[in-house]
Amino acid sequence: MRYRSVLVAILSALSVTGCMFHGDTPTAEAPQSFSIVNTSAPEKNLPENPWWKEVGSQELDSLVSEALENNKQISIARKNIEIAQSSLDTVKLGWLPSLSIMAGPIRSNGLVLLPNLPMPLAGTGSFLAFLPTWMVNVIQLPSRTKEAEKNVEISVAEFLAMRASIAAQVVSSYALLLACIEEENILNALKKNVSAQLSTARSMTLRGLNTEVSTNEQDSYLQKIDAQVVTNHANKIAAKNALLTLVGRPLTHFTPSERFGTLKLDSIAPGNTPTSVLASRPDVAAARAKIQATDYGLSATASLFAPTLTWAGASLNASANVNGTRERLTETVQLGLLTWTLDPQFIGKVISANKQYDGEIIRYFSVVENAMKEVDNALADFEAKKTSLVKQENALANSRKNMKTYQAMLKNGLLSETQYLQTVGQFDQANMAIVQTKLQTIISLSKLYQSMGGGATYGQQQYRLKNQSIAGISRDNTQK
């Protein structure tokens, strides 16, 4: 009884030894502000923010929701969480004993010692033995458990990062598809316009009122438009296929229900500070969890130096003929021992694990630096694209007013039809430039929110990003 009390006390003390070898995990400091001053804008809960709703398209909102549910890359990331959770469960099973069952006949004139059976057998008859064995490094196993828990956090962070990336890609692909359809309409109108100019130029050339140089220029321009039409058609197919793949649909025909002009760009860049962006960016949380997992792994490696505790028991029922008499034997054996193995490779394993830990720290700070660079660049690009879009829209508004004047001049004979068609062509080209700039602005908005981890946890009740770590993980949640 006293032996058991001491053993329980030792196990209770050692079972809480699952701690990191180096202790506190380093935390990178963010810069004070971004290059683009955005402190006047309100801060947003970036991971929970469905920023794509600000674009004002119900169809886009539905497509993003569909992608977050059915995208194959997200499904793979979700399955990786289950794999990591299964690995954690497997590590936890190391606390349970194993059980061996042995049974069979025996015939012997002397003592027989069977493998794994802690007592000899003699005589002729049969036996049935139960041998529970518990062998575990009670210092190492808690560290391995913590390491496996951190690996679950890593898989969750990578899952959330994938969600933020897919949402941004859906927005960009949808905007590109609508832009291609809009450009197709503009190019067809422009082609019709230039064809009319070319027809007029040829008629005037036949009358000697024009030169072949002007006709050739119009024909060359028409050929360039045809090339743009073909390229735009290919881009439309690519955008459609990319969108369908992202949402998990087969590559079939798809016609959007909305037009490019309905997409809104009233969004302003969120006013989150660099510190708040780092606190909720999934890849930063993953990199920090990798440091902690490696640190726990280092503790587990160092604990190889600790002794291994083994407890074994045997319960044996045997029947045998002894001098013509049938006898039955029941025996119970218990034993416990500490095994201390001195492996010459132990020091090398610890050094190797420590180098891996150092490498994860360097990788973590590299991820932080890249994160800040991506956000800073994305903020600057979005502000530049949005400013350019506003200027071009103002210029196009002025051109639209002038078109009414040109129409009146054409009607009153103050402007030739050729001159008017040239003006219409210039207006179409300006409108084409507006479409391109607006598309690039939407793509820039997508990159901005992706760089900030926007929408990473939207619709996920079980996972939260906080202080560069994952919160709210449980076995039940990972299996949903």
Image (spheres, rainbow, N blue to C red):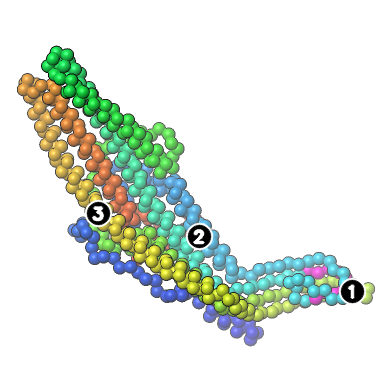
Badge 1, how many Cα within 10 Å: few under 14, some, many 20+? few
Spot occupied by residue 412 in the image (x, y as percentages of width and height): 6, 21
Q: Which residue is mark 1?
A: 109
Under mark 2, the amino acid is Ala
* Residue type of the residue flagged with mark 3: Leu
Mark yes or no: residue 142 visible: no
Please report whichever mark, 1 or 3, sits nearer to the chain's N-terminal start.
Answer: 1
Range of magenta residues: 120-128
**Measured from the top left, where is residue 16 in percent x and y?**
51, 76
Quadrant (top left/top right/bottom left/bottom right) for the N terminus: bottom right
Instruction: From the image, give the main secondary structure of the stretch colored magenta.
Output: strand
Q: Amino acid at mark 1?
A: Asn
Give me the C-alpha separation between circle 1 and circle 3.
Answer: 89 Å
> Which mark is on residue 84?
2
- Can residue 111 be seen in the rendering of this structure? yes
Indicate yes or no whether the magenta region holds residue 118: no
- Label 1 secondary element: strand
In magenta segment, residue 126: yes
